Amino acid sequence: MNSIEKIVQQAIQDGYLTPAMEAEVGRICDTASELSIEEYMALDRLMGALLTGEVVAVPRKQFINVMEELVLTEAIALVGEIEANSDRTLDLGDIAAYALNRLPPLYATTEEGAHFQRNRAQEQLRALIVQQVNEAIDHSLHRPDFFPERQAINKNAPAGGSILEQVTSLLRTYAPDLDEQAGKGQPVAVLG
């Protein structure tokens, strides 16, 4: 989808405005020097459809993958240890993604479900999680820097950066309400 009109047409047809559609509309609005009359009319139509309930905005996250939290916890501990004892800086996002691609997802929609998934993972998957995070770190340590110009998905995240900056960025991605709870703009301390 590359135009506001097409996105709005799709949202009205489906009855839903997905986070991806919302992001694309935002991207178009942010990058356009000026919107056309047609684009303004499409946005007006979308607003009306959202207000009447003809189109429902799908929340960004109605579920969590508990495996992400478990992998990040393990990766933070191991990467922190490596960075403290060497001059290497590792990309926590790369390591987590590598490990997550090799582990089963553990989705939950409630706190009770998340608690169940955490307990299940600790009992049945702990060794596999540790193994995959270690393999991800090993892969990262021995990977040549073929594409140093590559851009991270979250363009506001620090490129490379310290582990604290990476963890703070990842926490803001996976726990967006954390800033409000910890005091906006303050770095979030991770205790291990």
Image: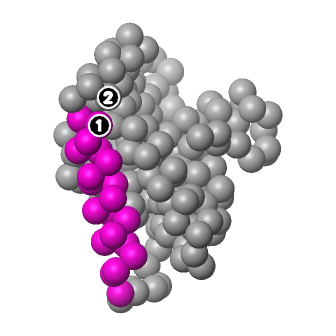
- Labels 2 & 1 near each other (Cβ < 8 A): yes
Q: Quadrant of residue 114?
A: top left
Q: Is residue 55 visible?
A: no
Q: Residue furthest top?
A: 112
Q: Three-letter amino acid code at disc 2?
A: Gln
Residue 122, x across and y down, in percent? 32, 28
- Pick whichever, 106 or 157, lies toward us: 106
Q: Is residue 83 left or right of residue 21?
A: right
Q: Is residue 72 left or right of residue 34?
A: left
C-alpha distance separating marks 2 and 1: 5 Å
Residue that carries the numbered disc 2 in the rendered image: 122
Residue 166, x across and y down, in percent? 58, 58
Q: Which residue range is magenta in the image? A: 125-144
Q: Three-letter amino acid code at disc 1?
A: Arg
Local crowd at mark 1 within 10 Å, few (<14), some, or many (≥20)? some
Q: Residue at the spot x=33%, y=59% of the render?
A: 134
Residue 88, x across and y down, in percent? 54, 77
Instruction: Indicate yes or no whether the magenta region holds residue 90.
Output: no
Instruction: Indicate yes or no whether the magenta region holds residue 126.
Output: yes
* Quadrant of the rendering where the C terminus is positioned: top right
Q: Quadrant of residue 175?
A: top right
Q: Residue at the spot x=23%, y=35% of the render?
A: 125
Q: Residue at the spot x=45%, y=85% of the render?
A: 148
Residue that carries the numbered disc 1 in the rendered image: 126
* Quadrant of the rendering where the N terminus is positioned: bottom left
